[in-house]
Image: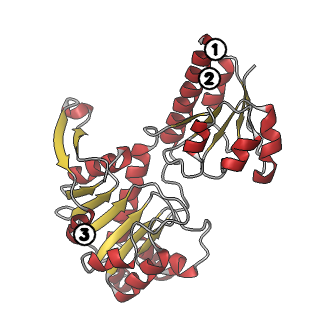
Amino acid sequence: MIRILANDGMEAAAIQMLEEAGFEVDTKKVDQDKLAEALKNYDAITVRSATKVRKDLIDACPNLKLIGRGGVGMDNIDVEYARVKGIRVVNTPAASSVSVAEMVFAHLFSVVRNLAESNRLMPEKGKSDFSSIKKASEGVELKGKALGVIGFGRIGQETAKIAFGLGMDVYAYDPYVAEAEIYLHLGATAGNQRIKIPVKTVSKEEVLKKADFISLHVPFTDGEAPVIGAKEMAMMKKGSGIINCARGGAVSEEALMDALASGQIAYAGLDVFAKEPPVDDRILKTKGVSLSAHVGGSTKEAQSNIGAELAEKIIDFFKSSKSK
């Protein structure tokens, strides 16, 4: 029997799919420093963001046949090394795209309408004085503004769809994508029509200079230079905004705090952080910043989709391997 360690958990429906296909699934969490020994009893491991599968762990587990990542990025897995060792590596790139894109706009709406500050002031002054609350709530509309999307894969394109639906302009940058076709689905009440919008990507510099808000959708590994640091922020429009629902560290938090203090950047929305939980109190207390605890893909729909897609890929791999 094929044994799978779902070390960062797995949806119940996905576990059922695997068990009905004849697999044994163990969801008991194993600490990182004990994984090498524990994995000797398993044929596959699935992870989310917490567990790291690096070269030393791969070398210690020659019995491992598959590594599954529930989610898009695989920064916590030494993917190429695993493949050289003959281990299949799979992820679920399509499952959480909509959820993350919607989180981008949850943060955007929050910062441009100052919802966090209003929410903080309402219990204090809501019964007696609306004047300060109204001042805090002075905001701007997104319609007619320009959204810059850095990283134009599945999530970046889903983000662009919402932007187009709001009447925004979109400037996209991706070194691997020259152009893409965005399809807006108008829903059942509009006859399930789809509108095609072709998008040609531009240079990163053009995105930085023309966008009112920038959203990142890129991979990032510790030790790399930030995708947006002080230099890039200086190129952006004064009073613009940055949303990072991609990877912690992709935006320099120190440079961002400085840019917010100077007014060069007016808004920020952060779902991910260089250290989680964040160690810099300024990030948690700065006005104009919308925060969430790395939950961009944590909707019921996304989790269900992630589990189902991962289970299907695991089943397909082992069935295919058995038939060879």
Q: Which mark is residue 212?
A: 3
- Front residue (pair 19, 209): 209
Q: In this view, which residue lies farthest toward the bottom?
A: 262
Horizontal and vertical percent position of residue 101: 38, 51
Question: From the viewer's perspective, is residue 195 above or below residue 263?
Answer: above
Residue beneath the point at 34% across and 50% down: 156
Of labels 1 and 2, earlier in sequence is 2
Residue beneath the point at 70% across and 22% down: 23
Q: Quadrant of residue 287?
A: bottom left
Q: Is residue 66 visible?
A: yes
Q: Quadrant of residue 44?
A: top right
Q: Is residue 129 visible?
A: no
Mark 2 surroundings within 10 Å by alpha-carbon count, few (fewer than 14), some (14 through 19), many (20 or more): some
Horizontal and vertical percent position of residue 9: 67, 41
Q: Which mark is residue 3?
A: none
Left or right, 102 with respect to 192, comes to right
Q: Secondary structure at mark 1?
A: helix
Q: Which amino acid type is shown beneath numbered disc 2? A: Met
Of labels 3 and 2, earlier in sequence is 2
Residue beneath the point at 28% across and 47% down: 177
Q: How many marks?
A: 3
Q: State the CA–CA distance, disc 3 to disc 1.
A: 53 Å
Question: From the viewer's perspective, is residue 297 above or below residue 314?
Answer: below
Q: State the CA–CA distance, disc 3 to disc 2.
A: 45 Å
Q: Which amino acid type is shown beneath numbered disc 1? A: Lys
Residue at the disc numbered 1: 322
Residue at the disc numbered 2: 17
Left or right, 282 with respect to 129, comes to right
Residue beneath the point at 40% across and 74% down: 229
Q: State the CA–CA distance, disc 1 to disc 2.
A: 18 Å
